Image: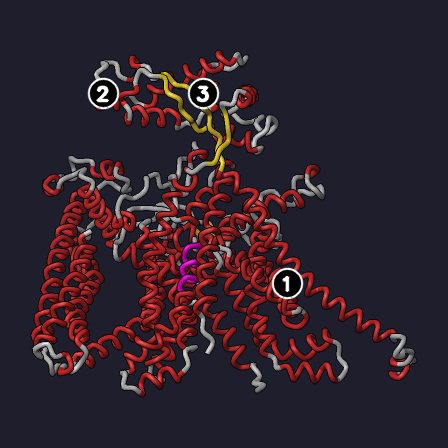
Amino acid sequence: MPTFWLIACLFLMSAAGFILGRYRAVLSTGGEVRKLHSLPSYYGYNVALSTLLPALAALALWSILQPLVIDARVSGMISTDMNSENTSAELMMSDVQRVSEGLNIAVARNEMTNEEIRVMDADTVDLRSRLADLGIALGSEVRPEILTAARQHQDMTHAGRLMMTIVVVLLAIVGFARSYGLTDKDFRARNVVERCVFALLALAASLAILTTVGIVFSMLFETISFFGLHSWKDFFLGTTWAPNFRGDSELSILPLLWGTIYISLIALLVAVPIGLYAAIYLSEYASSSTRSFAKPLLEILAGIPTIVYGLFALLTVGPMLVRIFGRGSEGLLGLTWMTGATSVLTAGLVMGIMLIPFVSSLSDDIINAVPQSMRDASLGLGATKSETVRQVVIPAALPGIVGAVLLAASRAIGETMIVVMGAGAIAKFSTNPLEAMTTITTRIVSQLTGDTDFASPETLVAFALGLSLFVLTLGLNILALAIVRTYREQYD
Amino acid sequence: MKTSLDRHSGGSLLMQSTRTKRRNAAETRFKLYGIAAIAVSLLMLMVLLTTIVSKGLGAYQQTFITLQVELLEKKLDKKGNRNLTDIKKVSTFGYAPLIKASITETVEELGIVTGLKAKQMAGILSKGAAAQLRDYVIANPGRIGDTVQFRFLATSRVDGYLKGRVSRSSIENDKSIAPEHLDLVDSLIEAGLIEKTFNIDFIIGADASDQRPEAAGMGVSILGSLSMVLVVLALALPIGVGASIYLEEFAPKNWVTDVIEVNISNLAAVPSIVFGILGLAVFINYMHLPMSAPLVGGLVLTLMTLPTIIISTRAALSAVPPSIRDAALGVGASPMQTVFHHVLPLAAPGILTGTIIGLAQALGETAPLLLIGMVGFVASNAPDSIASGLLSPNSAMPAQIYEWAKRADPAFYERAWGGIILLLLFLVSMNLVAVILRRRFERRW
């Protein structure tokens, strides 16, 4: 990978810059370090940073912008070439990209040479089957104009890469030369370096914003193009989820939302009572030795990866529920209510187990924050411990507990592996907890794994689902925080 | 009608009134609920752990069949010149008769009576047996013509029979194995030719196809997971520490800082699958990084773990008392020197603990990896360099477990549980390191 070596090269240059800069600074005073404005290493850092940073920034910027520019130019070429045909420019563009990528892979694996591609004629060479041999599936036969565009795309990418390497190396050399020239005993190297480090720190902090922006925009753009292909009315108000590849899919979020909420509800019905009672017992009744023994054990449950819970649901809890509620005369209760191991109850129960430590540790903190004086006052009036907890501690901690439950709900709605493995794949409105149902996260996974075509509504719907999920969980989190902030009583 | 006084009367110091009794009973009940809640949670933990261990330990043992195979020259090297290109022309089909001959001979020697034909008898061996033979011959062409002892993997059905998963009644509808096979296996066990031993290939080997659960291993996906964790460590630690230093030590109190702080706490609660969508849209569709590459997985997990690391690093930084900063500033250090020379080293144990816990979280995460394609059959062997380790398609431990759980053959379930044991061992050791770090270096001010 040339970019990898380019970066390695930049780091090498900057390391050399450090040594040279430091050496030159010491030399400028004739070896008397005391006469320097800053410590000698600051001069080294100055040269190293000015070699590395502009070059790295240029590299990052270029890699982000180059695909944009090339895509715009190639798609401009396509749309002027053949607006006569009835395919959308976007579809053609994705074809061009796949062909171009396929050719790159073919060259990288020595299956084709660059010359061969240059003279290739789409009418005579069956490019589709050749690329399919390499594991690159194309939606349709490669037409000549697409091959031309792909060749253009490839050429521009190569030229862009080359230019990027030159620019980046030049920038590194210029940065080095400039800072090396400035290195002198009176140069305020420490101030410069510190300002630079400060900027880097601020940049690191703003990456959080960048991530959020990235999340929102990456999903927003695809969601908008989804709503261009599929009516938003069906998505938000329809009642059926039935994707197919004939093009008349019904893609409505409502049945998925129902499945998500139903499963989360069962999970909360398991987790909230158990978690809350566990937290009350641990903070109000348990001796410190019980506490120090039980609390870490509970936290182990929180540290277990969700894939483990998913497997537990699929292979242990599901079959167990079938043995209880299903199998007719062979089952434990002689019922035939349940046929498959995946069901709302399976996923809900296991997710509930997963959420117990989450609820209990959050509630534990909140209950502990209620001042002891309130308990003492209640006990002093003759209330029993349980009356104190129920009538004084819980009401005082209620906003926090409600916040904790909402956070747990947001966790449950966004949980993926347990429902992918335990809930099933059937989208429907049903109130029977023993039936398989599906959730938003499950559908996101199934629409985006395997062969995906980013121009079809069946794939793009995953982004709309993702955005809805993001908004939903974010809303719950903000609501939880708002409740805690508004209703929290300040006791101290 | 009773007055309120009546209800309170009737008790004394020596005898509880009905109301006191009721209240005390409620108290006991309430306490019992609490104990029950704890007991249920701990019971669930126990059930979970015992299920994992009891179902997963089997994956670390595998059934092997020892056979003497005569490497016939006329089959493997017709020209007799030991030329490797000629030897390589013989495909695995050419090796199958050797195995059949060997197993027939063994059965005859031992005097075992069976109604099976030679081809059927070879059905107790893994489908990879011929390939194993071929690899050996290509590696040692000089042994052609000799009789060599081999340890072949038994098929997953035979393996299941030795582990108690498969029985004569459970194979009634199974086409790939018949009760006669099990009779043969019983006789071979008596003869000491079939044995169950520790299976290192499960830990270091690669995944195998649907047909050969007995050969599937975690090794390559462990490498995939480790390279992802390395990427996360290399990116999330510097960025996370930098962001925390800025927010904790230098950030001015203004709306920008507020926005960043709210953002970070919100990102910590974003479902992990959303980060997968981000990775798919940005790193794969937009930046055209290779699908299924650990580098992309590492980038996605970095974004996901950053909030965790930032939150714990900030806690560690703010635990360093202001007097340290004042003293450093007082002797003439610049604010930057104060932070990097004094505050950061003192906060290092806390930062490391938080980072390790963040890495453990990244190691166990599955959902975002499904979206960037780090799931599926990766037949390749271990990557040969760092760059190919980061860029060539690979799986990750949790994704590999998910893949096995999806397959139809129940023999893969045992391997999925076994994989979970490995994954949990990694997580436990990481958390242990974090606990030890905290115990040894934590300072109370």
Task: Say which of marks 2 and 1 sits in front.
Answer: 2
For label 1, the residue is A274
Label 2: how many Cα within 10 Å (few below 14, some 14–19, many 20+): some
Give the amino acid type for the residue marked by disc 3 in the picture. Ala
Q: Percent position (x, y) of residue B201?
A: 41, 37
Q: Mark 2, chain letter? A: B
Image disc number at residue B122 = 3
In the displayed structure, B334 sits above or below B39; it is: below
Residue B359 lies in the magenta stretch: yes
Distance from disc 2 to disc 3, alpha carbons, whole Å, reads 26 Å
Distance from disc 2 to disc 1, alpha carbons, whole Å, reads 70 Å
Q: Mark 1, chain letter? A: A
Label 1: how many Cα within 10 Å (few below 14, some 14–19, many 20+): many
Image disc number at residue B86 = 2
Task: Tell me if label 3 and label 1 are in contact, CB under 8 Å.
Answer: no
Ranked by sequence position, the earlier of labels 2 and 3 is 2
Q: Percent position (x, y) of residue B273?
A: 42, 58
**One can see residue A261 in this view:** no
Give the amino acid type for the residue marked by disc 1 in the picture. Ile
Q: Mark 3, chain letter? A: B
